[in-house]
Amino acid sequence: MNLFARIGYPTIGMLREVGAASLFAARAARACFDAPMYPGQIARQVMRIGWLSLPVVGLTAVFIGAALALNIYTGGARFNAEQFVPNIVVLGITRELGPVLAGLMLAGRVSAGLAAEIGTMRVTEQIDALTTLSTDPFKFLIAPRLIAAVATFPLLVLVADIIGVMGGYLVGVGSLGFNGAVYLRNTLNFLEAGDVMLGLTKAAAFGFVIAVMGCYFGFRSKGGALGVGRAATNAVVVSTVLILAANYVITSMWPS
Amino acid sequence: MSVAGKPANGPKLAWVGVKKRLGGRDVLQGVDLDVAAGRSLVVIGGSGVGKSVTLKTALGIIPADAGEIRVDGEDVTHADTRRRAALMAKFGMLFQGAALFDSLTVWENIAFRLIHADRMPRAEAKARALETMRKVRLAPEFAERYPVELSGGMQKRAGLARAIVSRPEILFFDEPTTGLDPITADAINDLIVEMVKDLGCAAVSITHDMASARKIADEIAMLHQGKIIWRGPAADIDHSGSAHVEQFVHGRADGPIQAVV
Ligand SMILES: Nc1ncnc2c1ncn2[C@@H]1O[C@H](COP(=O)(O)OP(=O)(O)OP(=O)(O)O)[C@@H](O)[C@H]1O
Ligand SMILES: [Mg+2]
């Protein structure tokens, strides 16, 4: 095979995959606004995708906040800036670490779960069965999951922000010798609404990416258990990469 | 027999020159087939010849590359999602593996179309589901169970109940008796015959099981190499005059059809 073919075929294959995924995302997004809606399904997915993710997100956030406080203290001590721990913790958590780490945890929990669930429905013909029962799988299966993820991820990240700051507070007050009231005052005074908004915008975008990728790989999986396993793996890998890329794009475009 | 408002002798459902290429292979190469209301057609053929694909092209789950699908004489090959949903109200399908929704209880599976497509109140839908369960002889105590708690035969019954609950005009059965013991298989056959007679619908069944075919078929068609190579009344199956059909009916490894091992 010549060099062009060796580079060309994988490139065309990848472009085709990107195109198929984009079309899928567009169709899924459109299904969210089209009748019929299934409020019962949305409620169920809000519970599964949002509520049940709280422990994972909360635990991640508290440890990250605590570790961040320690690192900033160590680094700050090198140029006598230890007092900035609360300010930098809250900035780091709300703008970056809260949404990104919550997003990565959710990419594991949610997109793998969706890919496995929908993939199993695909290979056992349950998705075909939906169609024969006069129900559009995009509206019944995918739209409720997409809506639930985009709606609940910002709330999850808000919780992660608060718990992360609390993690920093516990370390700051417990072992770094900060006064509790001063720590909180510095946190609140320094924080701007824009920082939180940036984090929540990222969260909504990550919710979209995670739900679409989980559904996409599940929807087109084939070949039994092996195919479903591969769908779950691909969903996690691709949504993780896309989250990090989207994180950079959103941060760079955000008006500072 | 004519159904009100429908042409008296036109077919209920017809495949006209349907072609489909899948995975680099021409699976269907011009399938012509039709079935009238109140008639039961059985499609036989070897594994992987495209019997399931044939049914799925009629349902629009796998779009045909060429040819037409006609329902009541109307070309529905390229119906959009919304039209498709309306069209599906005429169809009931029993899938090869039953394809029950495993997140829903048995009665919710059976009542799925009533609740989600017809927007019937749950209580009323449940009553209808229970009534249909009685029809397919599925004991009412299974209503609140989940599909994984059912045996294969009971899953087939539940799938059958889901297919017939809203009294469709066209019924598809994809290997309804595969994997069942002979007694349960025969009970399913009886149910199918009863449903076709009961509902007066057009039925298309796929099977490898000749005993089942003889029992449920008015007519039998054989699919081979992407085409219908023989079609005739069920009574003629033993003197079809086709070497392919002969070989299939008697299950012989030697003949014009090569066994794929
Ligand atoms: N979605 C698909 N994508 C690619 N190939 C497919 C798809 N569905 C079916 N095929 C191929 O089409 C051919 C016919 O499949 P089909 O399921 O219709 O066989 P069948 O006649 O129902 O066989 P069986 O009796 O074993 O169920 C097979 O070779 C199969 O691999
Ligand atoms: Mg089949």
Image (cartoon, coloured by chain):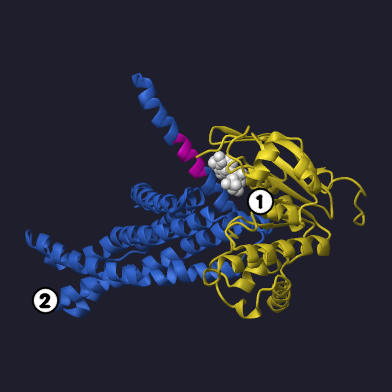
Chain colours: A blue, B yellow
Q: Which residues are magenta?
A: A15-22
In the figure, A38 relative to B123: above or below?
above
Q: Is residue A174 left or right of residue B249?
A: left
User: Which of the chains bears the disc numbered 1?
Assistant: B
- Residue B230, label in figure: none
Distance from the alpha carbon under mark 1 to that under mark 2 = 78 Å
In the figure, A234 relative to A10: above or below?
below
- The label nearer to you, 1 versus 2, is 1
User: Which of the chains bears the disc numbered 2?
Assistant: A
Q: Position of residue B20 (x, y in %)?
A: 64, 36
Picture quadrant where residue B255 is located: top right
Neighbours of disc 1 within 10 Å: few (<14), some (14-19), many (20+) = many
Q: Residue at x 55, y 52 (%)?
A: A28
Which residue was labeled with disc 1?
A: B207
Which residue was labeled with disc 2?
A: A177
Helix, strand or loop at label 2? It is: loop
Screen quadrant of the N terminus of chain B? bottom right
Neighbours of disc 2 within 10 Å: few (<14), some (14-19), many (20+) = few
Q: Is residue A228 left or right of residue B60?
A: left
Q: Are marks 1 and 2 on the same chain?
A: no
Q: Is mark 2 within 8 Å of ligand 1?
A: no
Magenta stretch: includes residue A17: yes
Q: Residue at x 14, y 62 (%)?
A: A71
Q: Position of residue A135 (x, y in %)?
A: 65, 58
Number of numbered discs:
2
Give the main secondary structure of the magenta stretch. Answer: helix
Q: Is residue B27 left or right of residue A151?
A: right
Q: Nearer the viewer, residue B192 or A64?
A: B192
Residue A170 makes an appearance in the image: yes
Give the amino acid at mark 1. Thr
If the picture is divided into quarters, which one holds ligand 1? top right
Give the amino acid at mark 2. Gly
